[in-house]
């Protein structure tokens, strides 16, 4: 761990390890190390193993927004680490693949792809900051495609299901997600069900981590999960998150001309994990200016430091990984966040993807409904 940071992803106890525990449980070769915290619960012959990921519900969020004697906190069996960056693109790809970000290449919301020399918003396959298709093919999947655990299990003759708002039949509420999980659980046969929902993350981005809206939504989800668990039998029900959240002060990088003049292109990855490509003759100036302006809230790492530190993962680097990195990576350690646009800086309150404990640590909640 770099001494400049007070927390670091633990790739031996990480969200990327969780699906490997599931694969091993179903008799399929894991893609990497398993999660010891979950392994100790995967010791019975369950009809269903259900993993529900609630976006953004980090340890600090459940401790501050939910009652100590409530359903989630009384079934909390431990905490573990997100990936770096602790953000949805990187972490949910890890829970779907069993690989670390340096292995799968889905590093953050916007990634630089050297093959087309563009920053791409990966989930939408558009050029960063626009609605224009990045190419006439899916750029992230062409260059960083992976086999997810659902497909892997089904291909190995097991039964697995993915339930999420972006997958047919596109359940657009937690009630619909819950109903689908219940219906699948009632079907015959041993199976794995992975379900994802975008709250409380969406509300926390808009209204803050501890707003009335964020607290209300999380409490409603907790009650709905409790109700669902009463209807499940012969099931190991696991609730977790992809990352935590903090409230932040947003600034727009375009308001700092001394920084902008140094850039080859706009920063990529995340507003709290900024990937910078710098003009060759301006690196010293960039370092000096960035540290002068943001040194209290960010640690600036060179490309070589990032690679040597194994910040994005300890496994074998994806073929694209090193070329996706810029000359510098600015990692947030304070509560300032650097957005590419003024609109984002003004609208986003809750944020994540930096190296604070509250962004990094996530819960493992387990309900054993065997028998």
Image (cartoon, rainbow, N blue to C red):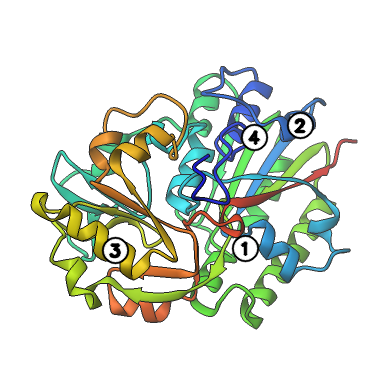
| Label 1 to label 3: alpha-carbon separation | 42 Å
Q: Position of residue 11 (x, y in %)?
A: 56, 34
| Residue 360 vs residue 182, the one in the foreground | 360
| Picture residue at 77% right of the left edge, 68% below the top | 66
Q: Which residue is mark 3?
A: 290
| Residue 334 vs residue 247, the one in the foreground | 334
Q: What numbered label is drawn on residue 192?
A: 4
| Picture residue at 64% right of the left edge, 17% below the top | 27
Q: Is residue 176 left or right of residue 186?
A: left
Name the secondary structure under disc 3: helix
Q: Which residue is mark 1?
A: 174
- Answer above or below: position of 243 versus 51: below
Decide: marks 1, 4 in contact (CB < 8 A)? no
| Label 4 to label 3: alpha-carbon separation | 47 Å
Q: What numbered label is drawn on residue 47?
A: 2
Quadrant in which the C terminus appears: top right
Q: Would you say residue 367 is visible in this rendering?
A: yes
| Label 1 to label 4: alpha-carbon separation | 19 Å
Mark 3 or mark 1, which is nearer the start of the sequence? 1
């Amino acid at each position: 761990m770099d001494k400049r940071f007070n927390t670091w992803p633990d790739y031996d106890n990480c969200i990327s390890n969780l699906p490997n525990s599931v694969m091993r449980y179903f008799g399929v070769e894991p893609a990497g190390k398993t999660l010891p915290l979950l392994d100790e619960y995967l010791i019975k012959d369950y009809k269903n193993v259900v993993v529900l990921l609630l976006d953004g519900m980090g340890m600090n969020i459940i401790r501050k927004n939910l009652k100590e004697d409530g359903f989630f906190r009384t079934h909390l069996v431990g905490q573990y680490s997100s990936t770096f960056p602790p953000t949805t693109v990187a972490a949910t790809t890890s829970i779907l693949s069993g690989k670390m970000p340096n292995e799968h290449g889905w590093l953050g919301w916007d990634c630089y792809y050297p093959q087309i020399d563009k920053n791409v918003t990966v989930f939408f396959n558009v050029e960063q900051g626009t609605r224009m298709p990045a190419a006439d093919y899916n750029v992230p999947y062409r260059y960083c495609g992976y086999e997810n655990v659902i497909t892997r299990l089904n291909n190995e003759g097991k039964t697995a299901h993915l339930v999420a708002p972006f997958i047919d039949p596109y359940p657009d509420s937690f009630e619909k997600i819950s109903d689908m999980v219940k219906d699948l659980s009632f079907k015959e046969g041993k199976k794995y069900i992975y379900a994802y929902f975008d709250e409380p993350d969406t509300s926390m981005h808009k209204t803050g981590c501890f707003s009335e809206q964020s607290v209300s939504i999380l409490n409603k989800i907790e009650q709905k999960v409790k109700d669902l668990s009463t209807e499940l039998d012969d099931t190991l029900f696991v609730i977790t998150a992809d990352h935590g959240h903090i409230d932040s002060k947003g600034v727009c990088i375009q308001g700092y001309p001394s920084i902008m003049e140094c850039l080859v292109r706009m920063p990529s990855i995340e507003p709290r994990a900024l990937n910078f490509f710098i003009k060759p003759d301006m690196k010293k100036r960039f370092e000096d200016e960035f540290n002068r302006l943001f040194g209290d809230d960010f640690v600036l790492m060179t490309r070589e430091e990032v690679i040597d530190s194994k910040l994005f993962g300890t496994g074998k680097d994806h073929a694209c990984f090193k070329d996706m990195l810029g000359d510098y990576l600015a990692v947030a350690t304070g509560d300032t966040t650097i957005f590419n646009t003024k609109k984002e800086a003004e609208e986003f309150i809750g944020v994540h993807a930096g190296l604070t404990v509250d962004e990094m640590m996530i819960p493992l909640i387990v309900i054993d409904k065997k028998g």
